[in-house]
Amino acid sequence: MSGQTHALTLQFLAWIDSSPRTYADAMDAWRTSCPRLTIWEDALKDGLIQIEHNGQISRARISLTSRGRAMLKREVEPQMKADKRGSS
C-alpha cells in the first residue's frame, strides 16, 4: 500500500468510526471512478469494514471490523500522542 493510499485508508476508517455511517453516506463521500484510489473496495477486501444489511442497501450500516479498529488504533493513536507532545 502506498503512503498516500495508506493515509486515505486511515482517514476513511477514522471517518467511519467517528459517527454512525450508512452505505449511502459512504458512497456519497468515498466513491471514486479513479482505478488507483480504491479505498472503499480495498477496505472491504482487507476486512477492515463491514456492511450490516438491514433491508435496503442504502440504509445498511457501515462499521469497522475488529481488524479495522485495530489498524486505526495502531496507526492513529501514536501519531495523536506525538502531535500532543509536539504542541506542548
Image: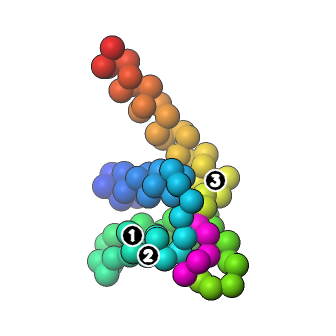
Tell me the quarter of the picture where residue 46 sits. bottom right
Measuring 53% from the left and 46% from the top, which residue is drawn there?
A: 72
Measuring 43% from the left and 76% from the top, which residue is drawn there?
A: 27
Q: Is residue 12 visible?
A: yes
> Which residue is label 1 attached to?
30
Q: Is residue 48 visible?
A: no
> Badge 3, how many Cα within 10 Å: few under 14, some, many 20+?
few
Left or right of 50, for residue 2: left
Check if mark 2's residue and mark 3's residue have beta carbons within 8 Å: no
Residue 67 lies, in percent from the top left, at 63, 53
> Which residue is label 3 attached to?
67
Q: What residue type is labelled 2?
A: Met
Query: Which residues lie in the magenta part?
Result: 58-62
User: In the drawing, what numbered circle is on residue 27?
Assistant: 2
Dot 3: element: helix
How far apart in space, not on screen, are marks 2 and 3 (Cα)? 21 Å
Dot 2: element: helix
> Relative to residue 19, is residue 56 depicted above or below?
below
